[in-house]
Image (cartoon, rainbow, N blue to C red):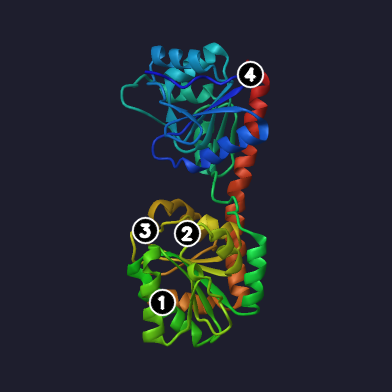
């Protein structure tokens, strides 16, 4: 197998265990490389960073891998124990950290008594996602265990152009606004019904609608103007969301940093009647928009679960409940409470990543 060339400089090996999302580790790699001028190798998935296949957990494969890459620190994720790696790292004096730690497990083939305990004791530090997990590792004899919480990539604020935000904010003036993001065709009727119901309470309400399929924009605009009698503006046609406009259709999918900042309330498309939430709710949470979502959380079940536990998102089971929740969140104080709780969850994830960076740097002080 041909490996990429090992770059010059101190190197951090980050391994993503099966079942874990790559994005938070990618953000961690970005910070290590950009902010601290470290080389970063990622295994477990392909990323934009330097990548390689993780070695099989056998003494020969691990030794060959470490001899080639010569990392200064090894950072594992999740709960998979890799006994051969831990033994080899100890022999070489390499620090090994376990981050985003969940309950430990060993793959089939390793059945030695006390194997997990031996592996756990070899970690320089274990950074657990919750206190229950942290207590479990302490009982197994881990040297240093901290409950940090879970890393989140999506707390990083999406980019936008301030000039556009200021211009649109001036056009919107004091109008109430809500955003329906990445809406599939199956949910268009529900979004329209929610907007219709909420307009009875706030007749100046503006909906910013981002369809999942940009090609649907023309059909949506024509249907709304014909069936609802609403005036519709389209961003792609450079039409302005003037005061009489009821729906502003934004066909572009790369301006969510702008829309989340402008809309106090966001409905997460795909989560009600679609194939599952297509965007992370942490994007909206990090930018102060209160979140309405359905029960189909897609790949973001953990994120929605944490937001729900913190009372940072409102869940709907059907289109009527979306309309009811939207009407409730037209009250600025209600939306603000929800958004503040969500922001706390999102910012916690970013803080966890920052603390992990600091612990990695500290561990490298004694590295080769």
Residue drawn at x 54%, y 16% is 70
Discs 4, 3 touching: Cβ within 8 Å: no
Mark closer to the observer (1, 3):
1
Could you tell me how far apart the alpha carbons at marks 4 and 3 are, in whole angstroms?
A: 44 Å
Task: State which tag comes first along the sequence, 1 or 2.
Answer: 1
Residue drawn at x 43%, y 24% is 82
Task: State which tag comes first along the sequence, 4 or 3.
Answer: 3
Q: Which mark is residue 367?
A: 4
**Category of crowding for the residue at label 2, using alpha-carbon neighbours closer than 10 angstroms: few (below 14), some (14–19), many (at least 20):** few
Q: Which residue is the site of mark 3? A: 276
Give how far across and how far down residue 129 sits, in percent.
Answer: 53, 42
Discs 1, 2 touching: Cβ within 8 Å: no
Q: Secondary structure at mark 2?
A: loop
* Numbered label tally: 4
Q: Which mark is residue 221?
A: 1
Discs 2, 3 touching: Cβ within 8 Å: no
Rendered position, 344 above or below 100: below
Q: Secondary structure at mark 3?
A: loop
Could you tell me how far apart the alpha carbons at marks 1 and 4 are, in whole angstroms?
A: 61 Å
Residue drawn at x 63%, y 65% is 164
Q: Which residue is the site of mark 2? A: 253
Mark closer to the observer (2, 3):
2
């Amino acid at each position: 197998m041909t490996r990429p060339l090992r770059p010059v400089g101190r190197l951090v090996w980050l391994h993503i265990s099966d079942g874990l999302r790559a994005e938070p580790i990618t953000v961690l790699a970005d910070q290590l490389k950009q902010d601290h001028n470290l080389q970063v190798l990622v295994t477990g998935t392909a990323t934009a960073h330097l990548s390689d296949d993780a070695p099989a957990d056998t003494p020969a494969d691990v030794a060959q891998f470490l001899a080639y890459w010569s990392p200064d620190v090894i950072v594992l994720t999740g709960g998979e124990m890799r006994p051969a790696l831990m033994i080899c790292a100890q022999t070489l004096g390499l620090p090994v950290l376990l981050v985003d730690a969940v309950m430990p497990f060993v793959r089939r083939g390793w059945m030695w008594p006390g194997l997990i305990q031996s592996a756990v004791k070899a970690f320089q530090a274990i950074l657990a996602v919750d206190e229950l997990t942290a207590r479990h590792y302490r009982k197994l004899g881990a040297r240093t265990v901290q409950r940090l919480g879970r890393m989140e990539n999506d707390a990083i604020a999406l980019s936008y152009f301030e000039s556009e935000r200021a211009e649109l904010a001036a056009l919107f003036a004091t109008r109430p606004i809500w955003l329906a993001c990445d809406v599939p065709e199956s949910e268009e009727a529900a979004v329209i019904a929610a907007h219709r119901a909420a307009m009875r309470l706030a007749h100046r309400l503006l909906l910013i609608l981002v369809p999942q399929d940009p090609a649907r924009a023309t059909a949506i605009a024509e249907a709304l103007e014909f069936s609802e009698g609403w005036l519709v503006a389209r961003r792609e046609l450079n039409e302005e969301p003037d005061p009489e406009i009821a729906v502003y259709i934004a066909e572009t999918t790369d301006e969510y940093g702008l829309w989340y900042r402008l809309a106090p309330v966001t409905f997460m498309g795909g989560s009600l009647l679609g194939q599952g939430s297509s965007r992370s709710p942490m994007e909206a949470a990090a930018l102060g928009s209160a979140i309405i979502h359905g029960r189909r959380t897609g790949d973001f079940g953990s994120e929605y679960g944490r937001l729900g536990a913190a009372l940072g998102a409102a869940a709907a089971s059907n289109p009527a409940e979306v309309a009811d929740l939207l009407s409730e969140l037209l009250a600025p104080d209600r939306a603000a409470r929800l958004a503040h709780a969500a922001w706390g969850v999102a910012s916690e994830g970013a803080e966890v990543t920052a603390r992990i960076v600091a612990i990695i740097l500290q561990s490298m002080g004694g590295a080769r």
